[in-house]
Amino acid sequence: MTMEKFQESMYKLIVETSTKLPRDVRRAIKAAKARENAGTRAAMSLATITNNISMADDQVSPICQDTGLPTFKIKTPVGVNQIQIKKAILEAIAQATKDGKLRPNSVDSLTGENSGDNLGAGTPVIKFEQWEEDYIDARLILKGGGCENKNIQYSLPSEIEGLGRAGRDLDGIRKCIMHSVYQAQGQGCSAGFIGVGIGGDRTSGYELAKEQLFRSVDDVNPIEELRQLEEYVMENANKLGIGTMGFGGETTLLGCKVGVINRIPASFFVSVAYNCWAYRRLGVKINAETGEINDWMYQEGEHIDFSKEVEDETETEQKIVTLQAPITEEQIRELKVGDVVQINGMMYTGRDAIHKYLSDNESPVDLNGQVIYHCGPVMLKDEEGKWHVKAAGPTTSIREEPYQGDIMKRFGIRAVIGKGGMGPKTLAALNEHGGVYLNAIGGAAQYYADCIKSVEGVDLMQFGIPEAMWHLKVEGFTAVVTMDSHGNSLHADVDKSSLEKLAQFKEKVFS
């Protein structure tokens, strides 16, 4: 096999997976959009999502800025050199990163140093399997950190929050799956997809769960008990009222796939792999002699072109407030949960490394009255040395809970933008200091990149591109107030109401 041609095929697979959602996922999102009531926050969110999908199509840019940990599943005929295949995949990953199709996400776990090319110990993940077909089956999933952090594993028997005792039976498994959807809330960029692995050990259970995400959204489980379970979860998870981004609404889950393997008598694990709406997985069939792509997978059925959709759902029932940074405390105190805001002016990115740094050091810029954006963008430098934003959606904010309130008060920050909400410590600080939390639409990396008109500077590049503090000038950057300066939190309200609804599913369903 020509390795040069195979590497080219792998590069195409990486780019397509990062920039274009497969057809089965698009159909699921379109169906969710049709279920929502016009003018609601959920409808606005889904309109933004479909707009973002269309923009990624047109610009061949990442759908979401967090391109995750690339995981490949490769089946090869007997005799194919897997060592050479791995080398070609690594070269393709490095090239795609250089070209801005992947964000550099490989970080040394001890030093925190970013490799800059997505290569390093354990990254990317490549799993090989031999088979007796005469072609290579290559599949890739890009699963971001926000949804990866909402994966969960249960050991049965167990007491499940809101649902009571879960035993080692189908009904206990059902309770685990329902709880897994509840606990993800909006932090995993709902509405999402889940893969469930029943059995195995702690490692193989999670591997089985992730393997389910390689199934088609439209397929039917060949095991009757699991088919019924999948249908039950799909029907009832959407009654929890968590909705898109955790804003409430009719659709919380877009897909559920369950697999089972044997276990040892002492252990009974139920493992759940949660995936965001930006469900980026594709596959190709490759000629084992030439290295060329013969066919693409997950592309059966109707293709949805969201650029042709009418986006009148972007209108909301809430008022839209325009804020010009720097923002005053008086302006912040006027905002309340549910308001939609549009920000003009400067904002500064800050993720985990920046928040830890600011807790012990002075800020490199004056943050009084300013906006911090929880974002790790995809950035490219042109031939003249000027930086450009290629993708810039929000990251999950709850990771910054230990630092956020203290940093806001210390530096005078008035607004924080992220996704999924924050906890009681931050909420108390917003009330005391006069601050607000704004929830942007998770995964909408092209939509928000379009709002960024220029990169005015960057500090703390020693932390790597995703973790540096980027100085961004924005226009019309839209987000929803979900935590205000009066002690109100939409996230806490949705969590409470969805837990109450979860309790309605206590009763035994499967024997």
Image (cartoon, rainbow, N blue to C red):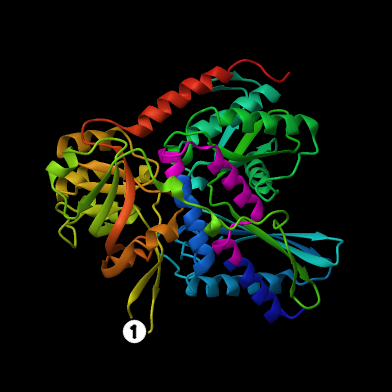
Side of 119 relative to 354 (left or right): right
Q: Is 469 drawn above or below residue 49 in the view shown? A: below
Residue 261 horizontal/vertical position (percent):
75, 38
Q: Quadrant of the N terminus?
A: bottom right
Q: Quadrant of the C terminus?
A: top right
Q: Does the stretch in magenta take in 346?
A: no
Q: Amino acid at mark 1?
A: Glu
Q: Is 15 drawn above or below residue 231 in the view shown? A: below
Residue that extends furthest to the top in the rendered view of this protein: 507
Q: Main secondary structure of the magenta part?
A: helix
Residue 45 location, quadrant: top left
Q: Residue at x 54, y 72 (%)?
A: 96
Q: Which residues are magenta?
A: 16-44
Residue 303 horizontal/vertical position (percent):
65, 57
Q: Secondary structure at mark 1?
A: loop
Q: Residue at x 76, y 36 (%)?
A: 262
Viewer-proximal residue, 451 or 7?
Answer: 451
Viewer-proximal residue, 116 or 369?
Answer: 369
Residue 157 horizontal/vertical position (percent):
62, 22
Does residue 264 appear anywhere in the picture?
Answer: no
Q: Residue at x 45, y 68 (%)?
A: 115
Which residue corresponds to mark 1?
A: 384
Does residue 203 appear anywhere in the picture?
Answer: yes
Q: How many marks?
A: 1
Q: Is 370 drawn above or below residue 269 in the view shown? A: below
Side of 212 relative to 160 (left or right): right
Q: Crowdedness of circle 1 by 10 Å Cα count: few (<14), some, many (20+)? A: few
Side of 432 relative to 47 (left or right): left
